[in-house]
Image (spheres, helix red, strand yellow):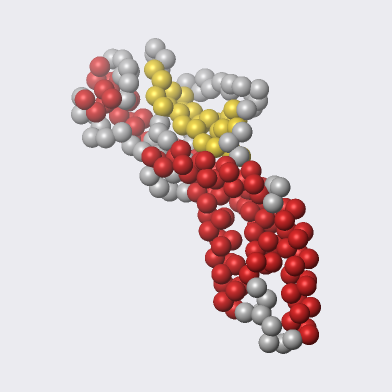
Amino acid sequence: MNRRTLIRVGIINLIVGVLIVSPFLPGPSFLSTPINFISSSIQFLSIPALVVSLFGLVGTIMEVKKVSRDKTYKIGARPLLMLTLPIFSFLTVIWLSDFARTYSRETAIGRATPLIIAVEKYNRDKGYYPVSLDQLKKESYLKFIPSPWIMGVAQYQYQPTGDSYRVSFSQNVIMGFNFEIVTYDKNDSHKAEGELETLYVTNTKHWKYYIYD
């Protein structure tokens, strides 16, 4: 089998795999809309594409038979891609995406720390919480509003609740059909919305998340 063909097939599979998990990778948050669209589209196509892998399997077997008859014959990339790409994409969706989502969640939570510190300092100085995050910039509590620095997470959302506040962000779960809402609440008064009411804890105090379906 041609080594160059194997490398080409491997690189293409790797690129598609990276695109699938790209919403959970570090990068500028302004890319969240196109990145989530590309990832969701590939995830959606990966399921019916499993049928294509059957044709790829037949094609690969036929290519192997040709090699057995002619040792100089080189197996082409097309049947190998038809076989491996749908399977690799599907496995990435159901297995690797979950690990990547955990990484992105913990990264975005960690990067929100300066924001929470600034909100608490504002409250100590003023006696009340800011109405919006812009006040933190206007009154020099923050030079800039921190970014989650996860390509699939747009920005942090801030919601004052009288004597407290919430900081939250959301990220795609699978195919754009549901979302993970991650929320900071210092009073631990978290509440899940939507059809699914299960709250999940994180590795960081006062942060919990739920799946909005």
Q: Position of residue 138 (x, y in %)?
A: 21, 25
Residue placed most toward the observer, 128 or 97: 97
Tag count = 0
Instruction: Identify the residue at horizontal 39%, vertical 13% (top origin).
Output: 163
Instruction: Identify the residue at horizontal 31%, vertical 15% (top origin).
Output: 128
Q: Position of residue 16 (x, y in %)?
A: 56, 56
Name the quarter where the N terminus is drawn. Answer: bottom right
Q: Farthest residue toward the bottom?
A: 71
Name the quarter where the C terminus is drawn. Answer: top right
- Left or right: 189 as drawn, with respect to 111: right
Instruction: Identify the residue at horizontal 56%, vertical 32% (top origin).
Output: 179
Q: Position of residue 89 (x, y in %)?
A: 63, 54
Instruction: Identify the residue at horizontal 31%, vertical 33% (top origin).
Output: 145
Q: Farthest residue toward the top?
A: 162
Q: Give residue 64's quadrant in the image.
A: bottom right
Figure check: 53 above or below 29: below
The answer to whether residue 191 of the structure is visible from this angle is yes
- Left or right: 98 as drawn, with respect to 185: right
- Left or right: 116 as drawn, with respect to 55: left
Q: Give residue 186's quadrant in the image.
A: top left
The answer to whether residue 201 of the structure is visible from this angle is no
Q: Position of residue 208 (x, y in %)?
A: 53, 30
